[in-house]
Image: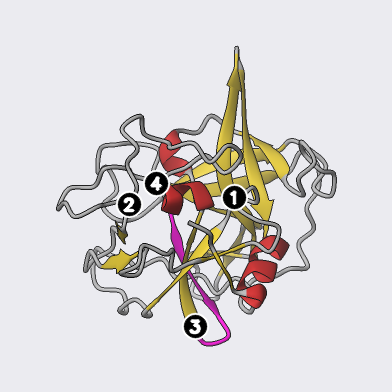
Amino acid sequence: MHRGTPRPKLTATAFYANYKDTCYLISNWHVFAARNPETNAFVEADGFEPDSVRAHVHTMPTYKLKNDAGDPLWPEHPRGQSYDIAALEVPKPEARVPGRFAISLDIFTETDSAIPLVMGMSLFVLGYPLEEDVSGSLPIWKQATLASEPTAAIAGKPCFLVDTASRPGMSGAPVLIRDINIIKLANGQFQAAGPTRFVGVYSERYVRDDVHLGRVWPETLVHEMLEAQIPARR
């Protein structure tokens, strides 16, 4: 996250998603705004507010977060900023090149939504938990366990919890179910196959003693946000 400086002030995770022939960079409201979505307090003590975001893909594109009047360029959920998701419309990323990938996930047309969410099942949070560039622009697949009923509200909000030891840099990460099966091909080689489903956006972590939980905002809320296109408030 930037404000008129070449070096990022804050780092987090985001991902590309196609919806109705439009490409969005999806993350958390608190990532784009650098504010607490519940209290509206600044994330940084110095009151830092970003005006652009730089995506760590092969071309390192920078996208404006605000217009010249200082108004946010991204929509928020119709219920407001406490639903901690955001989507910034951006040009479609370039096709992959060797060693570098722009993560593009068509979350509403290419996933297998028939895979059910079941208590105790394994999920994957795709993000960047390490400050070191250990995997280039490729995310780390952090395993998590579904820790709350997916249809039960958490603190009055329609979200669910996952059990995983994550880090702040994972905010805005896509959460997936991946049903992996190893099959043997006719030529004798083995190949991984199976459906993948996008289930939500990772938001924040709860750490207390030895308990590590994270909040996930379900995919239905992302759909509602993109349909409504309500501009985020300043």
On the image, numbered disc 2 is attached to which residue? 50
Q: CA distance from mark 4 to mark 3?
A: 23 Å
User: As shown in the figure, which amino acid type bears the numbered disc 4?
Assistant: Ala
Q: Is residue 173 visible?
A: no
On the image, numbered disc 1 is attached to which residue? 84
Mark 1 vs 4: CB contact within 8 A: no
Instruction: Provide residue 107's location: percent of width, then percent of height.
Output: 60, 70
* Helix, strand or loop at mark 2: loop
- Identify the residue at the far left of this view: 6
Which is more toward the observer, 188 or 52?
Answer: 52
Instruction: Provide residue 63's location: percent of width, then percent of height.
Output: 31, 67
Main secondary structure along the magenta-highlighted residues = strand
On the image, numbered disc 4 is attached to which residue? 12
* Helix, strand or loop at mark 1: loop
Q: CA distance from mark 4 to mark 2?
A: 13 Å
Residue depth check, mark 2 versus mark 1: number of the one nearer the observer: 2
Dot 1 alpha-carbon crowd within 10 angstroms: few under 14, some 14 to 19, many 20 or more: many
Specify whether 95 is left or right of 87.
left
Instruction: Give, as a single range, the part of the protein colored magenta.
Output: 14-21
Instruction: Provide residue 42's location: percent of width, then percent of height.
Output: 43, 37
Q: Report which quarter residue 214 is drawn in.
A: top right
* Helix, strand or loop at mark 4: loop
Instruction: Provide residue 161's location: percent of width, then percent of height.
Output: 70, 38
Q: At 73% across and 68% down in the image, what residue appears?
A: 113
Q: CA distance from mark 3 to mark 2?
A: 24 Å
On the image, numbered disc 3 is attached to which residue? 22
Mark 4 vs 2: CB contact within 8 A: no
Q: Is residue 20 magenta?
A: yes
